[in-house]
């Protein structure tokens, strides 16, 4: 915009109806001739203020603001189209309003900043037939109301042409109820705020006059105040009255009781004094109490809302419909299918075994295996790690991850309800709602506290009355409000819900709410070795057959044994199982996993076992239990007679020793308990530098050893979550480092989905931070309540300060908990 | 306020009531006008950082990296975008209120120099402010645009001073504060009307306070107007809304006149 900004002048076309001010977009009076020349086009302005505003923005070199609006021109964007949103899905997002107009509600997950909000509003606002647009940055939702001149598909296409992905926002009863309560709370706050300001202005006049105001005028002010306060008390403060009523009806006392009492008492007394021309009115007090306490409520609601949002986003990662193929008969059929063979079906109708077509850029809709195609897949929703991971045929994929480059054909593994992402969503909700025992205790004793508050307030009132103070009523009301433990009731739950969400964003799913509390106390960590300190990327490096065979048939026999072993391990998630991935055609009957020992099952009528020699073999001769060499050997047996020995090798994690060192720096003891006998203690110590090492342990040994350690420490058990179930349960708390798709089976209190062990020290530090913040919150709220009450009793705290302190206290607690949104990694 | 006579107190209450009503009637227009400036200031800084030479819209274009990062919800956005914007808003807002306070101080001092409530000059001024209000109401309802020439006339004094903002680079906090201050000094009929109240207070401190309260009152709406703007604009275009706001303001003007002269 290198133009000259001229003051007046300019010829403006006569279509008065269309003339909107260039700056503020209000209509320009038809007789006004004021304009600014930009890029040699004269643009109308509505007033000198707007003219000055344009000049101001120009002088500050912020013209890009206007450029933005230019770029929002739909025609200019039409050719930037990416993939168009699919039409059938949109149906779910359209609803018809009572007046016949239609409403489209969309979730736009990649709304990145306030400028995006602005852009969407501008672009949609220019469309014909669009009546209302609201874009909510916090909830990432867009709502458009339009009439018959417009259609939903065109609007959705317009949005996706701007580069946003569009998902229908299917109305969800819980969330809708939530946003309704939010809206009504805002309205109540607004009314209370306006009422408060007005009434305070009137009270101000009374105050300034030093009580010498003419009686008629004073009465007028009081009646006006009453008219303004009544809706505030009856409508804005309604949630308090309602909650208080129900509490009393159920013979309990909640925080709402004193609050409601204070507001109603202030109002009723003032009404009485207004009618009878009595001494004093407290309309301003009633309004202030209502307004400030509503602010506290709002802070609380927002923090819950935030949690709800993170929950929603998790659910909304999944598309509503998927492209399903008829199940191909064999590999040839698989290679020949095209996208034309697909059919669009609803996600929730999927069954295990269905074959789906996933386009590049789309979200993978189901847990399963890749059948055909190669692509990079980002599992950011699970791990917090956005870099795409390569996926080939055979690789596992998770619903909710994003397919980047190539087309993939995937076979669905389970029904939608069992998808890992849905499990996470459920756990997330559970864990976020958890409260520590002392907080539950505080809740139970709250009604006694409130009873005490009511008595103290009454006592204060009586004392000051007999002492002859004019302010006895005000003091009594102030005590009622000031002692309300709002902040205390928020202190813990808000911190927990924020912390749970933060951890999930970093790839840590908490399954048990107590995890954070206990992790903060941890001063000893026990690692399982395989899959925890090592990659668990076991490979079969050597196969030794138990019986002599011809050299010519050797390799064939080895392949046969490998295939048998692979069949037995197919149902297991143990790291060892992944070493056996040879193709096979066997079906296994009675396939069982014996914890800490191995697997067994029947193949073609014969009983096979695979695992530790003592488990798989039946022999009197201890020598035959000896593996054929050093290292980690397991044996395959047929009817408990040795068939073949497999040597497995694992690689230590690169970050393992760094993590152990970091733990020592944090003053945390480390231990390795492993059932593996293949590595000697010295080797393990050399590799990982842990303090306590025990090898060759049975599951029961591990439990005992954990119990021993618990005599002197709070123990966290870190393992793969599948093998050491008992030891994990015995430890104070447990963390699973697991392949993400086996997430569901593990029994740990928390699960590390991104497999990065470096998260462990971060989690422990974060748990401490969480504990600190909760303690700060609780300390602050308790101190606040208990120091302010005496001052209030002495009549030293004016009501406005009490109410303001109350709401600031709540806000402080909520924003302090907000610090848990960040985690040092 | 120590030797406040009853009549004076009435007058002050009246002033405060009309200041409030004034804010109420003018809110729609304020939102559209100042909201635009707020958006430009807050977004201008952001886009400059985002684009670094690119077209802003291209930053928003779809690319795999962005989708991937957006799939994990928002610690990053919350930290990198919201906080600076809120900080900027506070700085600009502080500047704006400071601007108003300077005006209020000047007006209050002027009122003091004119010699208290009852001097003839003072009554004239108050009458003038009533007339100004009515003119504003007429403009708002779209019936008579005369008040614009007053604004234009006043703007002529300010313009040279205001144009100095072009030397400001908005990277520094102090400059942001100055830009905010200049923003407060932009010509605005509503500000002039409240200024007349400050003048009428007859005290430098009161004038300053009145303008400060007014400025604080405008802040939440103006700064949060990004979202409200779209909601307000269609309303603002409704003739009956504009006319009733205008009528309300004319009513205020009449009331000021009658109260003053009667």
Image (cartoon, helix red, strand yellow):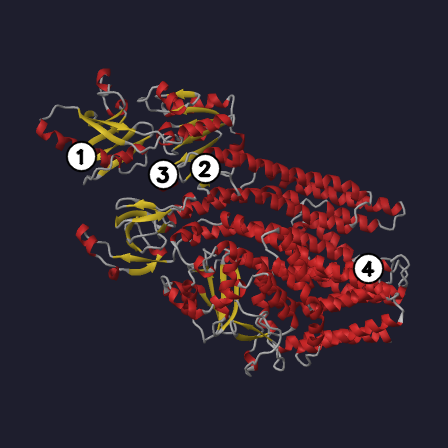
Q: Residue furthest bottom?
A: A14
Q: CA distance from mark 4 to mark 1?
A: 103 Å
Residue A750, numbered label: 2
Looking at the picture, does residue A601 appear above or below residue B34?
A: above
- Chain at tag 1: A
Q: Circle 3 — which element?
A: loop
Please give the residue where the numbered disc 4 appears in the rendered image: B204
Judging depth in this view, the residue of A408 and A437 nearest the camera is A408
The reply to whether residue A301 is in sight is yes
Near mark 3 (Cα within 10 A), the count class, few <14, some 14-19 or many ≥20, is some
Residue A618, above or below A211: above
Q: CA distance from mark 4 to mark 3?
A: 72 Å
Looking at the picture, how far across and down is residue B40, in whole percent?
57, 62
What residue appears at the point 58 percent right and 54 percent down from the top-left corner?
Answer: B85
Q: Which residue is mark 1?
A: A605
SS class, disc 4: helix
Q: CA distance from mark 2 to mark 4?
A: 64 Å
Q: Is residue A50 left or right of residue A70?
A: right
Marks 3,1: beta carbons within 8 A: no
Identify the residue position indicated by label 3 in the image.
Answer: A739
Q: Which marked residue is nearer to the observer: mark 4 or mark 3? A: 4
Q: Which mark is residue A801?
A: none
- Are labels 4 and 3 on one chain? no
């Amino acid at each position: 915009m290198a133009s000259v900004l001229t003051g007046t002048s300019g010829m403006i076309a006569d279509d008065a109806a269309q003339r909107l001010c260039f700056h503020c977009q209000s209509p320009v009076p038809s007789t006004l001739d004021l304009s600014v020349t930009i890029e040699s086009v004269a643009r109308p302005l509505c007033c000198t203020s707007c003219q000055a505003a344009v000049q101001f923005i120009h002088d500050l070199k912020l013209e890009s603001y206007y450029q933005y609006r230019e770029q929002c021109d739909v025609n200019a964007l039409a050719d930037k189209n990416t993939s168009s949103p699919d039409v059938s899905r949109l149906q779910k997002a359209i609803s018809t309003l009572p007046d016949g107009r239609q409403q489209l509600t969309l979730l736009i997950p990649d709304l990145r900043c306030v400028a995006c909000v602005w852009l969407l509003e501008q672009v949609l606002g220019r469309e014909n037939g669009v009546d209302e647009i609201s874009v909510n940055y916090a909830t990432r939702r867009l709502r458009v109301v339009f009439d018959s001149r417009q259609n939903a598909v065109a609007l959705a296409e317009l949005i996706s042409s701007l580069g946003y992905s569009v998902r229908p926002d299917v109305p969800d009863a819980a969330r809708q109820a939530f946003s309704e309560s939010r809206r009504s709370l805002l309205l109540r706050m607004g009314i209370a705020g306006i009422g408060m300001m007005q009434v305070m202005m009137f009270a101000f006049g009374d105050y300034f006059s030093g009580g010498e105001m003419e009686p008629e005028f004073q009465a007028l002010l009081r009646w006006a105040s009453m008219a303004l306060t009544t809706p505030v008390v009856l409508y804005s403060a309604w949630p308090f009255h309602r909650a208080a009523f129900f509490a009393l009806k159920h013979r309990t006392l909640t925080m709402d009781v004193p609050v409601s009492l204070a507001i109603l008492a202030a109002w009723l007394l003032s009404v009485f004094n207004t009618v009878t021309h009595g001494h004093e009115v407290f309309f301003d007090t009633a309004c202030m109490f209502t307004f400030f306490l509503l602010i506290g409520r709002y802070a609380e609601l927002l923090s819950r809302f935030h949690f709800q949002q993170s929950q929603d986003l998790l659910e909304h990662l999944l598309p509503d419909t998927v492209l399903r193929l008829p199940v191909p008969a064999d590999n040839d059929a698989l290679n020949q299918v095209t996208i034309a063979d697909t059919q669009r079906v609803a996600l929730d109708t999927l069954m295990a075994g269905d074959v789906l077509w996933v386009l590049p850029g789309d979200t993978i809709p189901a847990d399963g295996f890749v059948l055909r195609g190669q692509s990079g897949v980002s599992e950011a929703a699970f791990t917090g790690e956005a870099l795409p991971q390569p996926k080939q045929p055979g690789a596992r994929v998770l619903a909710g991850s994003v397919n980047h480059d190539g087309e993939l054909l995937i076979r669905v593994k389970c029904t939608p309800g069992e998808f890992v992402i849905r499990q996470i969503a459920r756990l997330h909700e559970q864990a976020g709602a958890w409260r520590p025992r002392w907080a539950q205790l505080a809740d139970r004793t709250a009604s006694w506290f409130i009873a005490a508050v009511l008595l103290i307030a009454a006592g204060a009132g009586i004392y000051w009355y007999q002492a002859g103070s004019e302010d006895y009523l005000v003091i009594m009301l102030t005590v009622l409000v000031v002692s309300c433990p709002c902040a205390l009731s928020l202190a813990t739950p808000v911190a927990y819900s924020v912390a749970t969400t933060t951890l999930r964003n970093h790839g840590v799913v908490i399954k048990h709410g107590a995890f954070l509390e206990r992790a903060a106390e941890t001063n000893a960590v026990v690692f399982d070795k395989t899959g925890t300190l090592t990659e668990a990327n076991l490979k079969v490096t050597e196969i030794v057959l138990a019986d002599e065979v011809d050299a010519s048939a050797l390799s064939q026999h080895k392949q046969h044994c490998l295939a048998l072993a692979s069949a037995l391990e197919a149902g297991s998630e143990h790291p060892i199982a992944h070493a056996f991935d040879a193709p096979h055609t066997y079906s296994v009957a009675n396939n069982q996993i014996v914890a800490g020992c191995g697997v067994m099952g029947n193949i073609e009528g014969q009983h096979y076992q695979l695992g530790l020699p003592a488990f798989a073999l039946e022999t009197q001769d201890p020598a035959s239990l000896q593996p054929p060499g050093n290292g980690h050997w397991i044996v395959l047996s047929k009817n408990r007679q040795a068939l073949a020995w497999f040597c497995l090798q694992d690689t230590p994690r690169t970050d393992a020793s760094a993590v152990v060192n970091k733990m020592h720096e944090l003053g945390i003891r480390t231990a390795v308990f492993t059932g593996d006998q293949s590595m000697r203690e010295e080797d393990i110590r050399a590799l990982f530098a842990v303090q306590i090492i025990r090898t060759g342990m049975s599951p029961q040994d591990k439990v005992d050893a954990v119990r021993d350690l618990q005599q002197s420490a709070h123990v966290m058990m870190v393992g793969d979550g599948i093998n050491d179930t008992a030891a994990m349960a015995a430890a104070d708390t447990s963390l699973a480092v697991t392949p993400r798709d086996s997430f569901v089976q593990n029994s740990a209190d928390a699960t590390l989905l991104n497999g990065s062990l470096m998260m462990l020290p971060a989690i422990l530090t974060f748990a401490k931070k969480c504990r600190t913040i909760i303690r700060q919150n609780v300390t602050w709220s308790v101190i606040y309540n208990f120091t302010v009450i005496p001052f209030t009793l002495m009549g030293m705290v004016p009501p406005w300060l009490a109410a303001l302190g109350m709401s600031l206290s709540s806000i402080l607690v909520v924003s302090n908990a907000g610090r848990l949104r960040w985690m040092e990694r | 306020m120590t030797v406040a006579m009853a009549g004076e107190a009435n007058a002050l209450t009246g002033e405060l009531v009309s200041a409030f009503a004034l804010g109420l009637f003018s809110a729609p227009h304020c939102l559209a006008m100042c909201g635009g400036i707020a958006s430009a200031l807050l977004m201008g800084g952001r886009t400059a950082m985002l684009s670094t030479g690119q077209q802003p819209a291209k930053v928003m274009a779809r690319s795999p990296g962005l989708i991937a990062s957006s799939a994990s919800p928002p610690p990053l956005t919350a930290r990198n975008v919201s906080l600076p914007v809120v900080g900027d808003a506070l700085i600009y807002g502080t500047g704006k209120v400071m601007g108003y306070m300077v005006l209020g101080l000047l007006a209050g001092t002027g009122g003091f120099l004119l010699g208290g409530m009852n001097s003839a000059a003072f009554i004239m001024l108050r009458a003038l402010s009533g007339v100004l209000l009515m003119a504003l109401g007429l403009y708002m309802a779209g019936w008579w645009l005369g008040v614009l020439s007053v604004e234009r006339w006043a703007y002529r004094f300010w313009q040279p001073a205001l144009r100095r903002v072009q030397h400001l680079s908005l990277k520094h906090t102090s400059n942001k504060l100055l830009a905010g201050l200049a923003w407060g000094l932009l010509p605005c009929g509503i500000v002039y009307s409240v200024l007349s109240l400050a003048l009428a207070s007859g005290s430098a401190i009161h004038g300053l306070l009145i303008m400060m309260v007014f400025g604080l009152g405008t802040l939440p709406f103006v700064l949060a107007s990004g979202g409200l703007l779209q909601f307000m604009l269609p309303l603002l275009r409704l003739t009956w809304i504009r006319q009733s706001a205008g009528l309300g303001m004319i009513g205020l003007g009449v009331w000021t006149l009658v109260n003053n002269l009667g």
